[in-house]
Amino acid sequence: MTNSKQDGDLKDGQVTLSGSCLCGGITFSVSGLLPRLYQCHCSLCRKVSGSASNSAMLVQSDQFEWRSGETLISRFKRDSGFKSHFCKRCGSPMPNAFDGGMWVPAGLLEQNDQLKVAAHLYVQSKATWHEIKSSAKQYTYMPDKPLVDLLQAKNKATD
């Protein structure tokens, strides 16, 4: 799953962002025209993040590169299929594969000032103490349109 990328290979509007876990043992990068973020407010995502929502992006496999520490990743999977990958040293959530791509927790990215939230998912189960103050589209559950398509629809880093 490792792909080598050089910053000089990127075209206009494309970026390379570095990411790491809290202890720095696991590092990775994402490159290219990056998608918008989503925030999931379901009870499982709240539990895995320890907060009001789980903020992430979905990138294609060729946009993702592990740089170090893959052996430090532990995995947990519920019978339902919900999975969580995390650093076995510090507990930070880690990127993990989905069909054709990688799920990347937004909070792990070092340079994230260009990232914007495009969608809030499962708002019907959000924490009662949390108020969503965002102009991003809100979905009661999962949108009818595939999430990858929804987030890729506006993928310019400067939008």
Image (tube, rainbow, N blue to C red):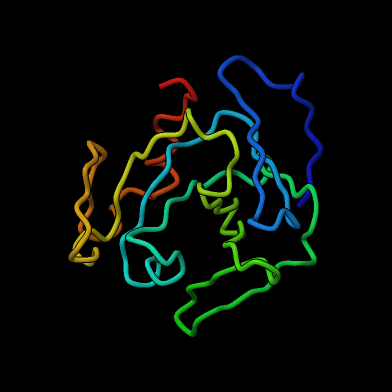
With 53 as the anchor, is 106 left or right in this view? Answer: right
Q: Quadrant of residue 21?
A: bottom right
Q: Quadrant of the C terminus?
A: top left
Above or below for 70 versus 153: below
Which percent across, then down, holds residue 120?
Answer: 29, 50
| Pick the front one: 121 or 22 | 22
Above or below for 118 versus 130: above
With 153 as the anchor, is 91 left or right in this view? Answer: right
Which percent across, then down, holds residue 49?
Answer: 45, 64
Instruction: Name which residue lies at 60% across and 23% down.
Output: 14
Which percent across, then down, holds residue 86?
Answer: 62, 67
The number of numbered badges drawn on the structure is 0
Instruction: Name which residue lies at 46% across and 33% down.
Output: 115
Farthest residue in the top direction? 12
Above or below for 35 versus 77: above
Which percent across, then down, holds residue 147?
Answer: 39, 49
Instruction: Name which residue lies at 19% across and 53% down.
Output: 131
